Image (tube, helix red, strand yellow):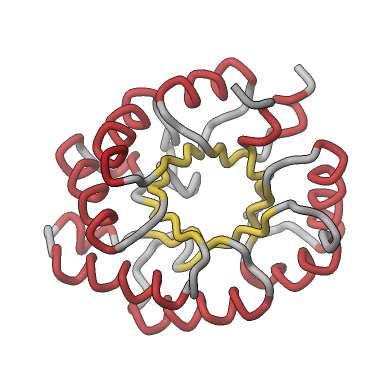
């Protein structure tokens, strides 16, 4: 197994985060040689400035946290984020369309956003806290059909939600592995033990705001 720091996307998506909080995040990412940072779109340009001359990936979120924006808005968000310097895009699936099993809408939306990524990785956040097992499988299958590169467990914004769970990560991994997609676990990963469990279940990325604690425990 690689060192844990190379699994971690050091994350700050809080609504009340200020510029100095983001700068601290970037400095921690450099100090710990994290794989990436995951931030809101308005800070992508700032991240590009502070992380220049490093190989730390700049990851941002699209349609966050509800996933209910129109496809056109999500596509524009993606194009703007890539233009500003984002390396990877984490989009939130349209959960209501998934619940209605509107396969055509979801697949076309993922395809459109993947095209807007212009060759950069696209992760589809499926929000496992709101889904049953069959819906998790469907979300993964539609992500495959849409041409995504990853499926991701959670936004971390569901009230009372657990976030990433071992059994969900394993189910996602088993659903997408033969198609070549990978799994990002996020939400509720606050210690080394939980991080290792997610990796053992099949995750190759960990979205967490507790990265420093995890690698230093």
Q: Left of 62 or right of it: where is 137?
A: left
Q: Left of 154 or right of it: where is 1?
A: right
**Rendered residue at 64%/38% (across/down):** 8
Q: Left of 17 or right of it: where is 24?
A: right
**Rendered residue at 54%/39% (across/down):** 205
x%, y% of residue 87? 62, 63
**Rendered residue at 69%/26% (across/down):** 3
Residue in the foreground of this view, choosing between 119 and 71? 119
Q: Height in image: 121 above or below 45?
A: above
Q: Left of 128 or right of it: where is 77?
A: right
Residue 68, picture quadrant: bottom left
Picture mark count: 0
Residue 107, picture quadrant: bottom left
Q: Quadrant of the N terminus?
A: top right
x%, y% of residue 143? 28, 55
x%, y% of residue 111? 31, 71
Q: Quadrant of the C terminus?
A: top right
**Rendered residue at 24%/50% (across/down):** 139
Residue in the foreground of this view, choosing between 202 and 104? 202
x%, y% of residue 135? 19, 44
Q: Height in image: 31 above or below 119?
A: above
């Amino acid at each position: 197994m690689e060192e844990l720091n190379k699994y971690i996307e050091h994350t700050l998506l809080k609504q009340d985060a200020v510029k100095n909080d983001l700068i601290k995040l970037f400095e921690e990412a450099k100090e710990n040689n994290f794989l990436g940072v995951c931030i809101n779109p308005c800070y992508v340009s700032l991240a590009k400035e502070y992380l220049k001359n490093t190989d730390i990936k700049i990851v941002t979120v699209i349609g966050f946290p509800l996933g209910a924006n129109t496809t056109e808005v999500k596509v524009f968000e993606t194009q703007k984020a890539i233009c500003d310097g984002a390396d990877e895009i984490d989009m939130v699936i349209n959960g209501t369309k998934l619940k209605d099993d509107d396969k055509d809408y979801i697949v076309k939306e993922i395809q459109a956003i993947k095209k807007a990524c212009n060759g950069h990785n696209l992760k589809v956040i499926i929000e496992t806290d709101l889904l049953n097992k069959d819906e998790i499988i469907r979300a993964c299958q539609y992500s495959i059909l849409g041409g995504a590169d990853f499926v991701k467990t959670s936004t971390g914004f569901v009230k009372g939600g657990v976030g990433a769970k071992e059994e969900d990560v394993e189910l996602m991994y088993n659903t997408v592995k033969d198609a070549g997609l990978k799994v990002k676990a996020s939400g509720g990963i606050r210690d080394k033990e939980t991080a290792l469990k997610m990796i053992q279940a099949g995750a190759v990325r960990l979205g967490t705001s507790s990265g420093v604690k995890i690698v230093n425990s």
